Amino acid sequence: MIELHPEKKMPLYEQLYNALAQDIRSGALQPGKALPGRRTMAAQLGISTNTVDTAYQMLAAEGLAVTRPRSGFFVQETGGMLHTRPQHSVVPAPKATPKNTVSNQDDILYDLSTGSIDTSLFPARSWGRIQKELMYQRPELLQRGDMQGDENLRAQIAAYLGEYRGVDCTADQVVVGAGVEYLLGCLAHLFAGSTAAVENPGYSRTRAVLENNGIPCVPVEIDESGLPIRALEQSGANLCYVTPSHHFPTGVTMPAPRRAQLLAWAAAKPGRFILEDDYDSEFRFATRPLPSLQGMSGANGPVVYLTTFSKSLAPGMRIACMVLPQGLLERYQSDFSMYANTVSRYEQQTLCEFMANGYFARHIARMRLTYKRRMEAFAAALHAGLDPDLTLAGAHSGLHFLLTLPGAGGEQAMVQAAAKQGVRLKGLSEYYMQDAAHCRPDTVVAGYSGLQAEDIPAAAAALSRAWRQMSHSII
Amino acid sequence: MIELHPEKKMPLYEQLYNALAQDIRSGALQPGKALPGRRTMAAQLGISTNTVDTAYQMLAAEGLAVTRPRSGFFVQETGGMLHTRPQHSVVPAPKATPKNTVSNQDDILYDLSTGSIDTSLFPARSWGRIQKELMYQRPELLQRGDMQGDENLRAQIAAYLGEYRGVDCTADQVVVGAGVEYLLGCLAHLFAGSTAAVENPGYSRTRAVLENNGIPCVPVEIDESGLPIRALEQSGANLCYVTPSHHFPTGVTMPAPRRAQLLAWAAAKPGRFILEDDYDSEFRFATRPLPSLQGMSGANGPVVYLTTFSKSLAPGMRIACMVLPQGLLERYQSDFSMYANTVSRYEQQTLCEFMANGYFARHIARMRLTYKRRMEAFAAALHAGLDPDLTLAGAHSGLHFLLTLPGAGGEQAMVQAAAKQGVRLKGLSEYYMQDAAHCRPDTVVAGYSGLQAEDIPAAAAALSRAWRQMSHSII
């Protein structure tokens, strides 16, 4: 029996989350069991459905629960080798590259594609001031720097990743580079002759970079816990690229048991490695994310940790980093000894001061709060316009969510109808590299990080108009 | 008969250069013929040996004459398939990577390694001001930009390369990237399955990058006109990496006939390409350099033009670019469509404004003048201390020269003796990737771009002390 205490300082949704999480972890709530419907739970506890929804989304973000369209939330299967796949209706596989049907950019009023940021949140004055001071006062930064990146920046990054992401590393192991694509290219050299399993759906960019660099990729279909180990084993790959904190684009969090299995897979044979892309872990809104896989496996485990500052600073600044285990580090240092680092030293040092003086932590905290409010406002506006059919998933982490709306004519129709109302977004099946047969139907991916706060009601209203009409005309 | 006119505005060395260049081009001075000794020529014309030396160095920089240690200057062979190699005495091949014998960095007073710049010449105020304005006024630069680089920057670069280097291209063909290494990595993908001929001696960095990316390299020994075509043909390579404007590190300029042969080599079979690295063509002190090979071959010829802003701006800022012919461009755009550009958009746009508003041209002109004076002062100080045995080569282009001093115990002894006097420089044989049997003996590579003007007399004096003593103790 769950008891909530409105008089306590802890918000009700967090109390509910804690109670449910404890029951799931203790086994009182069994794997696969349906959680009570939001309305039922809300009525039982005398709280709002929004509060219940938030707690459920937090469970999903933690990998403790999964959401299934039209069915609600279920306790996560414990990630055993046997897992049940949600019973999706089968949608036809999309064409190779389904094009966005919007041809004229001018028609786009609201861009919900992923990968933008709200530039008004960037602390341009602080950044510009630090950069200008460095330009005037530190002419030695004009000279070539350390091939792995400036040491003081690497030390800041190592400390930050250790504190916030449980990454187990020293500054020596950190390599700074001009974007994850560049670093993946370096890794492809270190892993020459390997085959990589990549998540399907997933980042087609990763696949393109690895294959451009001679690493064949096998897309492996994810389930509700992320990349399934049996399929990974069957793929024959010795490399595994994963986004365990927040699977792109579905938002699935890989739960701890699956993580342990993944590490066991890597440990089972020499030469197996995991590439962990922790691309937007800063944006976890309710709880701290699980620590990184890298941290679970230790400083010299078979995990390369990758992350980018594209979301936490700006995609227009090209700064990313990776953490190499010792054995790989030695090969990297030997094979790349002739290379200059790819990031301007002024931007490296600006970021270093930004981190050392607390600007970065404050900036992240401010962005997290702003994006959280925006997500909540957008979700609420969408629910108001499209309930009871709408399901949101993956909202409590990252900067996009999945939006499932049965009865609106299917994914393609949803994308096209949205475009007619001036909203750009992509169907979930577009993120599949092959075989979208198990793609969750009626689902689109909506990024809100490029959306201005004041545009939220209008963007939600445009989507409601787009899809309400269709669902009315179809039903 | 050469006549000089001291009353004319044109400097005497330039008049002498023009007269000799005309005689060489007309055939009045035949290929292979020795030019009169500097003292003889100076006495004949009633001018200083310095003036003669300058004119001779200019001829060498233009590829019209070659210098041979202890023998003086000779009219360039016309670059036919048959060429004579200067009769060097054979020096033993160096070990794989001869280490600089200086272990303690603190002992270094004067660093004559190549690749540094004089940071005091950098217009930090203008650059910093532009960058700060952009940071405050153009938040859209925080977002992801064009994969090839921002279009307005590419247009500036195309115009600049067209005007100053005779490069025949539009902005569409320009690709901006974070350093030549990065761009070479992209090219390695486009040329997968190729074998590359690289200059020996030459940039071991280029070889490392190409081989890291799966392109085997065959070092081809250069002669006094640069890369010989017969050896290139014999190498079996279909790619050819060259530094025709100013061979690294010898300073040899590839003369026009050899260039024509090189282009004919590329045209002879489909799939042959030339990678032209024009790494420091801004620093030609007396005359304009020959236009680029790319310009000779035309916008869609078999030449990829590469250059860097490491010398013209700063090595700490990672900006380089390449110009692709149309066929390669299409493959590049298709294979790299998922990639973000590797250069920060703020640095791209700062450079763009810097170029558009004339800062860049003025900066280059100022650096050229400063470095020229520095080179002249350094050369004069070295001559004063070490004549008559000293020969300098490659002084009139680029930011380093070769310094040959017979009787000082050979290259290794010269490097070690210099180090004892606090001067860091490398022996020429260290730039050989294999088979340094034909390495010019008694020769070191001296970069002066990182040397402060006020340190020149002392650095030259240190070298004189180092090598005079040895030559006295040995002879």
Image (cartoon, coloured by chain):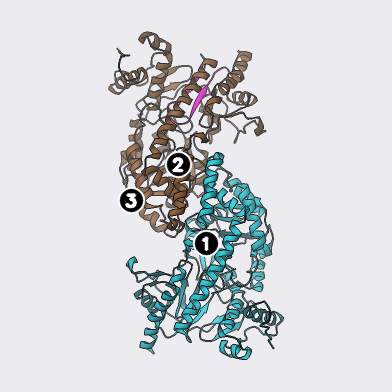
Chain colours: A brown, B cyan
Total numbered circles: 3
Indicate the quadrant containing the N terminus of chain B: top left, top right, bottom left or bottom right: bottom right
Q: Magenta stretch containing residue A309, yes or no?
A: no
Instruction: Indicate the secondary structure of the residue bearing disc 1.
Output: loop
Confirm whether residue A409 shows in the render.
no
Please give the residue where the numbered disc 1 appears in the rendered image: B311
Q: CA distance from mark 2 to mark 3?
A: 36 Å
Residue B132: x %, y % from top left? 52, 46
Question: What type is the residue that disc 1 sits on?
Answer: Lys
Q: CA distance from mark 1 to mark 3?
A: 34 Å
Q: Is residue B328 left or right of residue A350?
A: right
Depth-wise, is mark 2 or mark 3 nearer the camera? 2
Residue A321: x %, y % from top left? 42, 46
Of A379 and B315, nearer the camera is: B315
CB contact under 8 Å: marks 2 and 3: no
Instruction: Indicate the secondary structure of the residue bearing disc 2.
Output: helix
Confirm whether residue A306 shows in the render.
yes
